[in-house]
Image (spheres, rainbow, N blue to C red):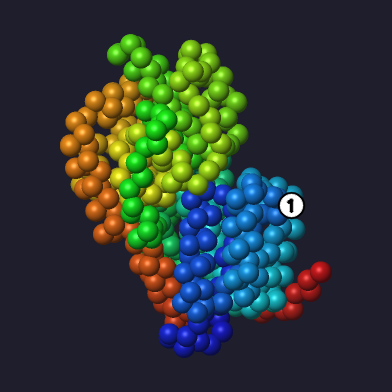
Amino acid sequence: MIGQPHQDNGPISIIHVLRAPLGGLFRHVVDLARGQIDRGHAVGLVCDSRPQDARIEASLAFLARQLSLGLSRVRIDRNPHPSDATALLHVAARLQATKPQVVHGHGSKGGALARLSGFVPGLPTAVRAYTPHGGSLNYQPGSHKHRAYMAAERLLRRRTELMIFESGFVASRYGQAVGRPPRLNRVIHNGIAPSEFESVPPGPQAADLVYIGELRSAKGIDTLIGALARVRDLVGTAPTLALVGSGPDGALLDAQARALNLADRVTFHGAMPVRDGFALGRIMVVPSRAESLPYVVLEAAAARKPLVATNVGGIPEIFGPLRRRLVAPDSVDDMAAAIEAAMSEDEVVQRRHTEELAQFVQGRFSLDRMIDEVLGAYREALAAPVWQPVMGAPPHPLVLSS
């Protein structure tokens, strides 16, 4: 057996490692950790130490009270950085102290730290699982960054006993860029709770359109703002847009809106709970250039928001029979045409489409299914033949400084 002895249906000890507690990745880890705790498993968490907004810090504090293996924070940078050595030692120290059966890394940096710890001699043996959440797999193929990160992924594959892909798209992207995944790999879609399938109607001051997410280039918001100007050219008036979220490109997007004479049509609202954000617009727009399996699309579908979204990543897997409605990314003309069509769509037809998508999502993207399938994958990995250290050297004690 890999790791500590266990019963087939007994509790499992699990440490989750991620970088920043932000966005859909953080929601995924929190949902997974809480579900595992509710099912009687021992769970711990390692993440970046730099403070986030008050809402996220409150969520972390609440979760920490339930983590029997503790919440531990250390500086973890997005890109390669000298602090990575300190972060790795910190993760190794936590594994030495808690001796988990499963170390589950999330995202590029969390996945790297979780699996690099497998090269540290003297640590207790554990299953090392990895969920990419898009991450470095979303870099442009052929670019210097993509080649470097994929070379790192090929090395880290040697310390990956279990791969969990959140979408078929990411699994395919991994196979193309890295090669054959570890023997034990699963596509386990993100899931949402039954309570999230209550509709969210637009508020009395709702904009025509709403975007919810990070304000950064990969999200394609510049294409969306450009499309507002194109709709103005087509029909004489630009739609109003509520931007909900924060990120490094906020100032650039504000400057773009002003340059296109759209400052009075685009409103920046900052981060807020997603269902509060849904009420700020009549139609949800997801203009992304790259995605894995975005929670915000699942949540919008469940809330029965009319959706204009791009045909990228795992979004077609969410749309299923309605995927023909998706829009090509990076096309101002296509985005403008899709927005104009959505705004002029008959209300009865629109309600039929939103209900059909909600029913499709409810049948295939269940939170309970996600948690149970991940736990099942852990058990399968724990039952696999004994894992032998790749380096071939016998383990020796590791002295960790406090």
Badge 1, how many Cα within 10 Å: few under 14, some, many 20+? few
At horizontal 55% and vertical 81% (from top left) the residue drawn is 3
Query: Which residue carries the number 1 mark?
Result: 83
At horizontal 48% and vertical 50% (from top left) the residue drawn is 24
At which x and y percent is residue 237?
36, 14
Residue furthest to the right: 401
At which x and y percent is residue 386?
51, 81
Depth check: give the residue in front, 368 or 85. 368
| Residue 44 seen in this snapshot | yes
At horizontal 53% and vertical 58% (from top left) the residue drawn is 106
At horizontal 18% and vertical 36% (from top left) the residue drawn is 349
Residue 374 lies, with reference to residue 226, above or below; the image says below
At which x and y percent is residue 117?
64, 66
Element type at marker 1?
A: helix
Residue 347 lies, with reference to residue 41, above or below; the image says above
Depth check: give the residue in front, 16 or 296. 296
